[in-house]
Amino acid sequence: MTAITHTNITAASYDELVDRVLRGGFGPDPKTQRIAVAFTTRQAVQHAGRSGGYRNEVLSLRLAEAVGSCAVEPGGLPDSAVDDCVGADIAQLLAHELLPVRVAALDAYLMHVLPHGSASGAWPCPLPAGSSLEKSRARAAAVTGLLDVPPGGTVLVVGVVNSLLEALRERGLAYIPCDLKGGTTEWGEPVRTDALTELERCDAILASGMTLGNGSFEPLREHALRHGKPLVMFAQTGSAVLPRLIGAGVSAVSAEPYPFFWLDGGPGVVHRYGGSERSGAAL
């Protein structure tokens, strides 16, 4: 059997990636791979010193040693989704009616056959132990370091995380904050709710993997590919999925599989793919 290396495991689109998985292009037949454990993680946070907070809800699926995840809007996932997943095979779940289930299943499968590491094209970036805010800022440095944008450039940020905005401000970059929840940033800036209408105004895109689960990822990828703009993904959702789309519109990925930085105060790691030499610098 020919060994799979990170040089031959990319796809031209999300749909092509799913099709390749279903055809066995990445390893074992997905009909033979069953989910043993399905669970959700719900979190509310307000970092010390920050004026606002937010909530997270994530569906995670366990396949052998791997965990695949997809974030959803809080309250947006029916309880039946977890029951649907347990004992089901990957092929079944890739045809599930709920997009977040399909994304989590794809992520679990790819995490199983292509775990993060040098063989998959990643290099680890350690996150130090610390408070929730300290770890958030450390992750933000790892993520924004993947952006190859000169000072004065404008970044469309899809999925507002104030620590990411703070890191962009420190680099002298302008940004357009977008999030389906709307509201304002830590600095009182209005958060736009329709990222696609803002694409023409930006020089680069920094987007959450959560866009996979709400269906807004492909238009971002297509725009970046068509216009040659950097598209950097910070991925708790689909951390094993998005690296397979580098070169097809995605320029770099900060991949953060479960357990996420906000679950533990100890040291952690994110896995970075793509990016410029700047992104290889230690935190």
Image: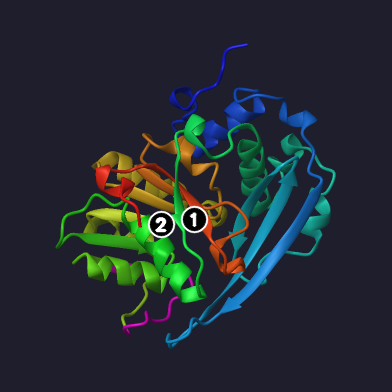
Residue at (33, 58) in percent of width and height: 144
Q: Is residue 181 above or below residue 24?
A: below
Residue at (51, 37) in percent of width and height: 117
In this rendering, position of residue 151 left or right of residue 78? left
Most common SS among magenta residues: loop
What residue did someone put label 2 on? Answer: 207
What residue did someone put label 1 on? Answer: 211
SS assignment at label 2: strand
Q: Nearer the viewer, residue 264 or 2?
A: 264
Q: Residues within 10 Å of mark 1 (few under 14, many from 20)?
A: many
Residue at (58, 51) in percent of width and height: 257
Give, as a three-letter code, the residue at label 1.
Thr
> Which residues lie in the magenta part?
176-188
Instruction: Indicate the quadrant where residue 72 lies.
Output: bottom right
Residue 177 inside the magenta-drawn segment? yes
Residue projecting furthest to the top? 1
Residue at (60, 22) in percent of width and height: 25
In this rendering, position of residue 137 left or right of residue 145? right
Question: What percent of the width, then of the height, locates residue 247?
Answer: 36, 34
Residue 251 inside the magenta-drawn segment? no
Query: Cβ–Cβ below 8 Å for labels 2 and 1?
Result: yes
Give, as a three-letter code, the residue at label 2.
Ala
Question: What percent of the width, then of the height, locates residue 110?
Answer: 61, 37
In this rendering, position of residue 132 left or right of residue 145? right
SS assignment at label 1: helix
Q: Is residue 80 above or below residue 225?
A: below
